[in-house]
Image (spheres, rainbow, N blue to C red):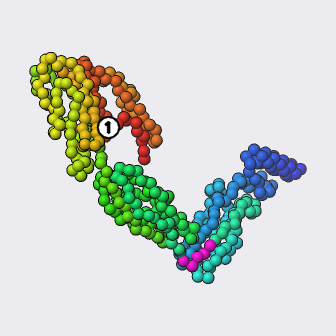
Amino acid sequence: MEQVSNKVVVILLITFVVVLALQLAVYTNIDIFQTPTANAASGTISFCVEKNFSIVPIGDQSAYFNIPYTYDVEITEPGLNTIFHDDTSLFEINNITGVISFTPQEADEGIYYINISVDSLCGGRIIDWKIVKFTIYMENRAPILDPIPDFTINESELFIYDVNATDPDNDTIFYGENTNMFQMNSNTGVIYFTPDQIDVGNHTVLIWAMDEHGALDWESVDFEIIDVNNAPVLHTIGAQTAIIFENYTYDVNVTDVDVKPEWNNISFYDNSTIFNISQETGMISFYVNESLNGTYSILISVTDGELWDYEIISLSVVYVNHAPNITSWYPVNDTLEMYEAESQYFNITKFDLDGTTPSTQWYVNDNLIYFVIIFCMLT
């Protein structure tokens, strides 16, 4: 009687577990593949529960005579206990890892449609399968570049060109070149650059397209960079202060990258009523008379005869020069934490007792920059 009661308990326990597992399957979208079993002597039960999964899309595949081929078949739920299968004599997929690895032979040339399947250890039934087109070639064929013309480009003019190629074996194509003048996108073949003065002249550039097996096609392309006049660049002057009863001097400097003499004939100008800048040298020099006391807004300009650059400066004529003050700033924290691709705004408010409009200079890593600081952290 006691033995019968134990069996009843076991049966009830099994029934409870099965009902619980079925409820779990409903709410978690899992399949139960194996009937629970019980050991009446020990009072233990076991059953197999498995999640739904599928094979990650594979796509058409190509392999070549005498070249090792490897592919790792993956499932959407990695780490599960599964078994991989294939229906071809061309290769044997690794049943546990799903890795396909073989070296095609001469007799293997042709097109194969191969069924790659996977089943669960729980029930041994096929969970998912994919029909994969395998093409075995006798040899790898090189990509074919579309014809590329020669180019004539003006210096300082943005140049964009998309190099294209096709691969008869549908292999992945990578692009490249042998010049320091620009760097094309290795995946898309796009050339994107703006020539500088240093690029002026004639350049012969080798442009190539290469497949994943190292076969390539190439073209020799001529780039002629035409010299154009570049505007002279006035070095930053900033706010200036002249002390009464003293001599004031300042040497205005400029940079012009042009090498042609006719584009490098620099002249300086100002609109001041209290001094005259040297048109040839850019030197400002005058004795500061008491009658000049005050603050002036002055335009300093430079030209190469065609193009101009300029700066409007604040000049204060005072008895005693007082240092400007930064009255507020943003952000107020001394230490900032920024994330990749996040922008940060900086700003200061300044005041000068002498009436000067103070100039502002920003530094990043001890390097002076000449634009409003709006930058992103990049990796």
| Magenta region | 135-139
In front here: 176 or 45? 176
- What residue is drawn where x is 44% and y is 69%? 218
* Percent of width and height locating residue 347: 37, 28
Residue 203 in sight in this render: yes
Rendering coords of residue 379 (x, y %): 42, 47
Residue 219 placement: quadrant: bottom left
Residue 147 at x, y percent in the picture: 48, 66
Per the image, the residue denoted by label 1 is: 370
**Residue found 46% across the figure and 70% down from its top:** 217
Mark 1 Cα within 10 Å, few/some/many (few <14, many 20+)? few
The amino acid type, in three-letter code, at marker 1 is Tyr
Q: Residue at x 57, y 79 (%)?
A: 138
In the displayed structure, 317 sits above or below 29; it is: above
Residue displayed at 78% across by 46% down: 26
**Residue 333 seen anywhere in this rendered image of the structure:** no
Q: Which residue lies furthest to the right in this view?
A: 1
Q: Which percent across, then down, holds residue 264?
A: 22, 47
Dot 1 falls on a residue whose secondary structure is loop
Q: Does the magenta stretch include residue 41?
A: no
Q: Which of 369 and 76 is in front in this view?
A: 369
Q: Residue 138: within the magenta? A: yes
| Viewer-nearest residue: 299 or 183 | 299
